[in-house]
Image (cartoon, rainbow, N blue to C red):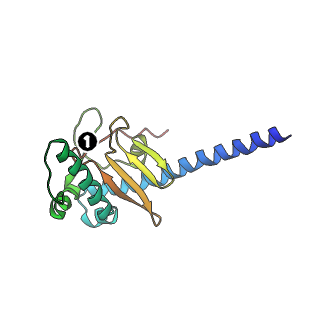
Amino acid sequence: MFRKSLAVALAVFTLALGGCDIGVRADASKAIARFLTAVHNDDRKAFEAGIDREALRADLRAQLTDLARAKGVVVEGGPSEFALDRMISPGAFRLVEAGTGQALHVAPNAAAIALIMQVRDRSHVCVGDPAKPHCALSFAKQDGVWRLVGMQATDRKIAVPPAPAKK
């Protein structure tokens, strides 16, 4: 009896966790699609609403400092706020088709984003090639809103596969 109850409880728990992943994936992919639409359309107001600028600055500063240190360069204080802010703009990203590298003519939809998104936990997702050491884009859910909190410092090209055909 105990084993059956334990098995049922584990099955329900597994389904609940799987359901959370599905819910997080759907919610985050919609928000990321809106963000990438802002990038594609150079909509600065929507772009700013979709980022955590302080978190992005910290992420980029750490990456650039590590990169400089690896090249034997030490810059007191790291990159300036001005330099970091220039990297954090809609124009800093390139949205391209996966495989061809051609610029996207339209912003990707949530279904296409879901194909290149990994759920880290209920409030963190990563967009990009999972084989790379750093996510192309990292998003966190803050106060109920998904915001960009991390991005690659050196290659800000986002390769998006075509959205699956609706059946």
How many numbered dots are placed on residues in this image? 1
Observer able to see residue 30: yes
Give the class, few, some or many, for how many residues have Cα within 10 Å of label 1's Cα (few <14, many ≥20). Answer: many
Observer able to see residue 40: no
Query: Where residue 151 sits: x, y (%)?
Result: 29, 51
In terms of depth relative to the viewer, which is nearer, 149 or 127? 149
The amino acid pointed to by label 1 is Val
Left or right, 145 with respect to 19, comes to left
Q: Residue at x 32, y 53 (%)?
A: 150
Say what secondary structure mark 1 lies in.
strand
Q: Residue at x 15, y 42 (%)?
A: 71
58 relative to 155, above or below: below
Q: Residue at x 24, y 55 (%)?
A: 61
Which residue does the numbered mark 1 point to in the structure image? Answer: 96
Query: Where residue 41 sits: x, y (%)?
Result: 25, 57
Q: Residue at x 74, y 45 (%)?
A: 9
Query: Where residue 94 sits: x, y (%)?
Result: 22, 47
Rendered image quadrant of residue 4: top right
Query: Where residue 52 sits: x, y (%)?
Result: 33, 63
